[in-house]
Image (cartoon, rainbow, N blue to C red):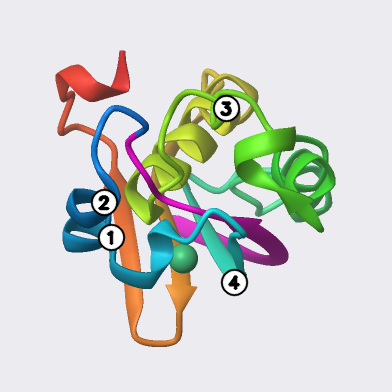
Amino acid sequence: MFITRKAEFSASHLCRIPELSEAENRRFFGDGANPNGHGHNYIVEVTVEGEPDEVTGMVMDLKTLKDILEEEVVGPMDHRFLNREVPPFDRVIPTTENVAQEIWRRLEPRVSSASTKLAKVRLFETDDLYVDVVRGADPAWLR
Ligand code: NI
């Protein structure tokens, strides 16, 4: 079974490659390259896979999952300027893809156990844009 917990955080970011010209950055990232940054209300959905425990009937204690999300994602990222305040985004461009990847990195060791696995991290940057990081793809970029 898969259980999903959702959390929200608001953060600022900007997307630019320092080695590139202003025009090239605008071409890649549009207004997102503006050095002043801009904000998003991010929504993260974390899905854990496992079998319900025979005694408790739960895959995982949802309060525990909420606490882990708070400690690893919401606490460190809410009301932060990601590029300036949240490593590794001082050197990694905080695109939706890279923020989702970082959330996966932070949660995976906390959520995985003998009976549970992190199955998916879905990160919404806006209502109509989200990125999924899914277990099993085992891509080089997760290492
Ligand atoms: Ni943005």
Residue 127, given in percent of the width and then of the height, sits at 44, 87
Q: Specify the quadrant of the image occupied by residue 118.
A: top left
Q: Amino acid at mark 3?
A: Asp
Confirm whether the magenta stretch covers residue 30.
no
Residue bearing the label numbered 3: 90
Residue bearing the label numbered 4: 40
Q: Is residue 117 left or right of residue 27?
A: right
Name the N-terminal-most of marks 3 and 2: 2
Q: Specify the quadrant of the image occupied by residue 37.
A: bottom right
Give the secondary structure at mark 3.
loop
Give the secondary structure at mark 4.
strand
Name the N-terminal-most of marks 4 and 3: 4
Mark 1 beta carbon near ligand 1 (under 8 Å) = no
Name the N-terminal-most of marks 4 and 1: 1
Q: Which residues are magenta?
A: 1-17
Residue bearing the label numbered 1: 29
Q: Amino acid at mark 4?
A: His
